[in-house]
Amino acid sequence: MSVAVVGAGAWGTALANVAAEACGGRTPLIGRDAAAMAEVAAARVNARRLPGVALHHGVAPTADLDAVSGEDVILLVTPMQTLREVARDLAPRLKPGAVVVACAKGVERGAHALPPQVLSETLPGLGHALLSGPSFADDVARGLPTAVTLAASDEGLAAALAVKLATRSFRPYHTADMTGVALGGAAKNVLAIAAGAAEGRGLGASAVAALIARGFAELSRLGAALGARAETLAGLSGLGDLVLTATSPKSRNFALGQALGRGEAPPDKLAEGAATAEALVALAAAHGVEMPISAAVAEVVARRVSVAAAIEGLLARPLRAEA
């Protein structure tokens, strides 16, 4: 099985190393900036995105999107808000029978679409899958043990991909529940901003734990409304990813929340939760699901309310039975 990776950020670079190790042969790593990719190819390290990690000898950095032609599997490692555009660019270049694995986490603005819907609309007739789960690029690139979830509506395809992409330290589990995996990846980034803000405000570990637990309840309600499996939401791509992202300063979303809570300038790094929050709340509202913590994050990120006012609003909510 031949694999190409589209997207040469930290996560794309780490996954290219995984694919090259797992599958052998040549693994194109495709980025948009020709000069930057030439630099990566020459140095055999992506110093701007993943410093200190050497590329596997099978990784072939390039800026030529035509490098996907003839590949069996394409790992599409792009931010959620550009997933549709990049998928459209790929469409005429992919061979019949190719499988595209979205590695994006979020909800598309405007359309309020999850990654599987974007793939089905832009790449009809091809195989579609989704990779998500608790994973930091640096951990994966350094060969630290990591478990993720591979989802495809055809679970046989998901299982085959999991086997092909597994290495000694990278362990994919498989499922047919693409909706559950997509929702977990989207919501955890939003909820991590809330947890980071609580930490940044000095509200204590108890408050952070409460936000994670009640945030997971929000995710579970939305998952039930959209037909996701409860076991998926309680697994790696749901609760597992939420725990990682909402507790570690290495998480860009948690770090953004910390900065907001402290009244500091946001870090100059992409935090998918900031782009997803409002779309996630709109998706939930369309299905009659209330997500107060996620809604508070959306208000804070849009600068419509302060962190202090958002916290006060959550604390003022009526007491209710836990559910």
Image (cartoon, rainbow, N blue to C red):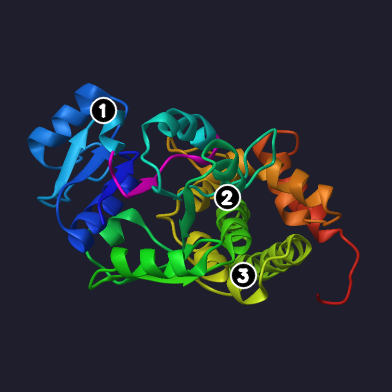
Identify the residue under disc 1. 64
Secondary structure type for disc 3: helix
The mark that comes first in sequence, 1 or 2, is 1
In this rendering, the answer to whether 249 lies above or below 93 is: below
The mark that comes first in sequence, 2 or 3, is 2
Seen from the viewer's position, the closer of residues 240 and 246 is 240
Identify the residue under disc 3. 233
Seen from the viewer's position, the closer of residues 20 and 253 is 20
Q: Amino acid at mark 3?
A: Leu
The mark that comes first in sequence, 3 or 1, is 1
In this rendering, the answer to whether 222 lies above or below 264 is: below
- Location of residue 282 by image quarter: top right
Q: Which residues are magenta?
A: 70-81
Q: Is residue 79 left or right of residue 297?
A: left
Foreground tag (2 vs 3): 2
Can residue 22 be seen here? The reply is: yes
Distance CA(mark 1)–CA(mark 2): 25 Å
Seen from the viewer's position, the closer of residues 98 and 9 is 98
Quarter of the picture containing the C terminus is bottom right
Identify the residue under disc 2. 116
- Within the magenta stretch, is there residue 77? yes
Number of numbered discs on residues: 3
Q: Amino acid at mark 2?
A: Pro
Secondary structure type for disc 2: helix
Give the image location of residue 76, x and y in percent: 40, 44
Crowding around mark 2 (Cα neighbors within 10 Å: few <14, some 14 to 19, many 20+) is many
